Image (cartoon, coloured by chain):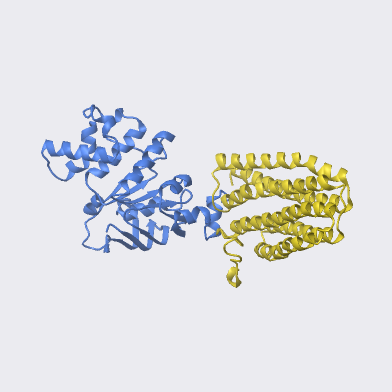
């Protein structure tokens, strides 16, 4: 199933509340985009979906995040296992610069257990293929990851996230630091990945949300203003605030 | 709002004013063409034909400006619907200009033949309604008025009926070959006026899309009337 269902989710940094009773359903084999102005809480929201928000000192969460019907905040839930099953790719590509491309791709696997070299290589190839990078790097697997271009580094990070075989992939502004060609490559990759994963992408590039997503959630001041099919949101939004934001009349 | 986006919205407003201006021009062209026919003013008819260049030029300029905004501003939501609606309305107005030219040219081809007052009054009546339909369609856009959109198919009915009635009137001219030749041309004029009405209805459909986000054909050949009491 791999369905993510968020309801009544509130989050705080210390005493400051940054999310107010947020709700969201991310369907499997679909891309859900979260849009909104800077500081609206969209990154916090996805960080709550794999329990990364609580890693910040003083941060707190209330409400429910169901993953296939199971609450990831239940007392017996294991945050490490949740983060393996619900992976995340960040805005800035952050490969381990001196580690080889191959080692980067399987870095997540090696944290948890020991694998025979042959299996690691197999899993690396699989992940690099899924991330659309294999053909470009297959002859330089022992080169440092830091030598790749920005777009390639981001796909290497996607490969690293995929290598641990997650079921959901969260992407926080995955293309905002990339040039247009690399951005397009990432967007194509998102379309390919959606066949196998539940994808949630945070972006403040609205055209990107329009191009890649099936559903879009628009947030303002930590609240959900509107959530619906992307086509509706960009052709006939129901809420005046969504209309103002997507047409650039906001602010 | 950023300066770029403000510039975009100002240009959007300017293009809409251009559309409304083009609509006024096309509506006046129809009026002048029919006036020429009714009053027997060949010079006026010739001026209508000459004036179409301006309509064509403005139509093309508007189209270019709309395409430019599509290409450079990635419009969405109501901006997208407005641009899409205007891109469709623009050629309807250009066609109305062409229909005015067709009326003027048809009149010029037979202006030395004897006429029939009854047929002329039919044409005047049709022209009055057709022009009023153009004005209603433009008002619907200007005021973002759904009700005005819905009035258009109702206004179109008498135009269609008058157009059909023309055949009977022209048939009565049969005993006089010259009048009949003139009358047969007037059937073409009536047909042009009927098309003007259809264009106005189509513009109303585009305004409806702008206002509601849904496209519906108010009338079409296979389903005479689609709108009903649930339309608002």
Residue B65 position (above or below residue A226): above
Q: Nearer the viewer, residue A32 or A173?
A: A32
Residue found at x 24% / y 36%: A104
- Does the rendering let one see residue A91? no
Residue A47 position (above or below residue B73): below
Corner quadrant of residue B230: bottom right
Q: Residue furthest left?
A: A116
Report whether A147 appears left or right of A10.
left
Q: Nearer the viewer, residue B206 or A57?
A: B206
Corner quadrant of residue B101: top right
Estimate the x, y position of residue B198 in percent, counting from the top left.
67, 57
Q: Nearer the viewer, residue B45 or A36?
A: B45
Q: Nearer the viewer, residue B96 or A47?
A: B96
Residue found at x 67% / y 45%: B15
Residue A78 position (above or below residue A88): below
Number of numbered markers: 0
Estimate the x, y position of residue B181 in percent, counting from the top left.
80, 51
Question: Which chain, by letter, is yellow?
Answer: B
Question: Which chain, by letter, is blue?
Answer: A
- Does the rendering let one see residue A172? yes
Q: Image quadrant for the N terminus of chain A?
A: bottom left
Q: Residue furthest front?
A: B175
Estimate the x, y position of residue B105 in percent, counting from the top left.
79, 45
Residue found at x 83% / y 53%: B177
Q: Residue furthest bottom?
A: B229
Corner quadrant of residue A122: top left
């Amino acid at each position: 199933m791999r369905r993510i269902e968020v309801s009544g989710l509130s989050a705080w940094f210390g005493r400051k509340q940054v999310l107010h009773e947020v709700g969201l359903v991310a369907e499997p084999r679909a891309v859900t985009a979260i849009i909104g102005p800077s500081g609206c809480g969209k990154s916090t929201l996805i960080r709550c979906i794999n329990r990364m928000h609580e890693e910040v000192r003083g941060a707190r969460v209330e409400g429910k995040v169901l993953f296939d019907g199971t609450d990831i905040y239940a007392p017996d839930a294991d945050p490490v296992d949740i983060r393996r099953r619900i992976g995340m790719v960040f805005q800035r590509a952050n490969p381990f610069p001196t580690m080889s491309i191959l080692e980067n791709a399987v870095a997540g696997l090696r944290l948890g257990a020991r694998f025979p070299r042959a299996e690691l290589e197999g899993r690396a190839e699989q992940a690099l293929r899924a991330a659309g990078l294999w053909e470009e790097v297959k002859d330089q697997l022992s080169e440092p990851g830091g030598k790749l271009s920005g777009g390639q580094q981001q796909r290497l990070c996607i490969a690293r996230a995929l290598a641990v075989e997650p079921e959901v992939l969260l992407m926080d502004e995955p293309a905002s630091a990339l040039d247009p060609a690399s951005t397009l490559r990432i967007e194509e990759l998102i379309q390919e990945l959606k066949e196998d994963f539940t994808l949630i992408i945070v972006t403040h590039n609205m055209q990107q949300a329009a191009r890649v997503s099936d559903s879009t959630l628009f947030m303002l001041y930590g609240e959900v203003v509107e959530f619906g099919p992307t086509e509706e949101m960009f052709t006939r939004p129901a809420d005046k605030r969504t209309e103002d934001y997507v047409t650039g009349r906001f602010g | 709002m950023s300066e770029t986006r403000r510039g975009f919205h100002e240009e959007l407003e300017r293009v809409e004013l251009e559309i409304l201006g083009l609509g006024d021009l096309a509506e006046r062209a129809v009026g002048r063409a029919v006036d020429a026919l009714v009053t027997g003013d060949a010079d006026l008819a010739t001026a209508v034909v000459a004036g179409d260049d301006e309509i064509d030029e403005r139509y093309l300029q508007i189209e270019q400006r709309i395409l430019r905004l599509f290409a450079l501003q990635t419009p969405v939501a109501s901006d997208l619907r407005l641009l899409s609606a205007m891109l469709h309305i623009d050629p309807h107005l250009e066609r109305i200009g062409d229909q005015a030219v067709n009326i003027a040219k048809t009149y010029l081809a037979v202006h030395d033949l004897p006429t029939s007052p009854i047929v002329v009054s039919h044409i005047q009546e049709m022209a009055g309604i057709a022009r009023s339909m153009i004005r209603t369609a433009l008002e619907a856009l200007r005021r973002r008025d759904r009700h005005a959109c819905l009035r258009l198919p109702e206004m179109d009915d008498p135009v269609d009926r008058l157009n059909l009635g023309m055949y009977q009137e022209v048939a009565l001219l049969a005993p006089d070959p010259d009048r009949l030749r003139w009358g047969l041309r007037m059937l073409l004029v009536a047909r042009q006026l009927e098309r003007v009405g259809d264009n106005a209805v189509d513009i109303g459909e585009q305004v409806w899309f702008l206002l509601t986000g849904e496209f519906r054909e108010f009338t079409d050949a296979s389903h005479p009337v689609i709108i009903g009491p649930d339309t608002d």
